[in-house]
Amino acid sequence: MAKARTIIHLECTECKERNYSKMVSKKRKFEKLNLKKFCSKCRVHNMHKEIK
């Protein structure tokens, strides 16, 4: 049986460090995720974009 979910990584738009990972459904047909999360390298809240 195939896996229905896949792992994506969230990358900081400022320093390009991959800080977070997230499991998402393979069936979703949306644009890439953009979330405002805390970056431990920059030490501020920045936008993080989806990277596979």
Image: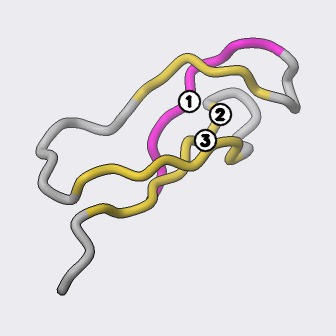
Q: Mark 3 points at which residue?
A: 11
Q: Characterize the local packing of mark 1: few (<14), some (14-19) or many (20 or more) Cα atoms within 10 angstroms.
A: many
Q: Mark 1 points at which residue?
A: 48
Against 36, residue 52 (above or below) is below
- Find disc 2 in the rendering and name its residue: 12
The tag earlier along the polypeptide, 3 or 1, is 3
Amino acid found under the numbered disc labelled 3 = Glu
Let me know if residue 50 is in the magenta part: yes
Q: In what quadrant of the picture does the N terminus appear?
A: bottom left
Q: How crowded is mark 2: few (under 14 residues within 10 Å), some or many (20 or more)?
A: many
Residues at marks 1 and 2 touching, judged by CB atoms closer than 8 Å: yes
Is residue 52 shown left or right of residue 25? right
| Marks 3,1: beta carbons within 8 A | yes
Looking at the rendering, the stretch of residues picked out in magenta corresponds to 44-52
Q: Distance between the residues labelled 3 and 2?
A: 4 Å
Image location (x, y in percent) of residue 15: 76, 34
Q: Residue 3 carries which label?
A: none
- Label 1: which secondary element: strand
The tag earlier along the polypeptide, 1 or 2, is 2
What amino acid is labelled 2 in the image? Cys
Q: Is the magenta stretch mostly helix, strand or loop?
A: strand
